[in-house]
Image: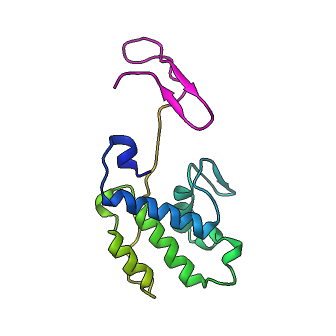
Amino acid sequence: MAPEYAMEGLYSVKSDVFSFGILLLEILTGRKNFLGFHHPTTSAATLLIYAWQLWNEGKGMELMDPLLKDSCSPDEFSRYIQIGLLCGQEDAKIRPTMSSVVQMLKSQSISSLSKPERPAFFTGRSTNDQGNTLGAPISCSVNGLTISDDVPR
């Protein structure tokens, strides 16, 4: 889910671009976008952050799904990872449009692609909060997938 939609309820055509970028990264890596990626040199909350960190360290090829090794060249894979990262940028205004993404996918050159900015990071409220600003206890439920706070907005 695009960060601007998750945090502010704002939806645009760039929200779909974000989702496409996540889907592209999942296909390329053979991994789902879930919490808790660990690597010897880094820990990341999501696949998007994990991919961006490895790509920034010049270790993007470590992301390749072993099933793609015989059918995808390293240059092609790097281009697709970079496109996925461009789609997952935190600021919706700098994400490409879907028509631009299609053109990038058709292109054979990685040099024409811009450098992705920081991806969307999600920093949620801690589940250890003991109260709100009024001093009343916060009622919440944790079910392994979500945390629901029972607090008015």
The front one of 8 and 110 is 8
Whole-percent x, y for residue 128 in the image: 55, 24
153 on left or right of 20: left
The front one of 136 and 33 is 33
Whole-percent x, y for residue 85 in the image: 46, 65
Give the residue at x 41% y 59%: 18
Q: Is residue 19 above or below residue 137?
A: below
Which portion, as a residue range, is magenta?
126-153
Q: Is residue 67 visible?
A: yes
Give the residue at x 41% y 52%: 2
The extreme bottom residue here reads 108
Give the residue at x 52% y 58%: 48
Q: Is residue 126 above or below residue 130?
A: below
Magenta highlight on residue 140? yes
Q: Main secondary structure of the magenta part?
A: loop
Whole-percent x, y for residue 93 in the image: 28, 60
Magenta highlight on residue 23? no
Q: State which quadrant residue 114 falls in.
A: bottom left
Whole-percent x, y for residue 11 in the image: 31, 51
Q: Quadrant of the C terminus?
A: top left
Q: For the image shown, how many numbered marks are present on the structure? A: 0
Q: Is residue 149 above or below residue 82?
A: above
Q: Is residue 59 visible?
A: no
> What scheme was used to colour the molecule?
rainbow
44 on left or right of 14: right
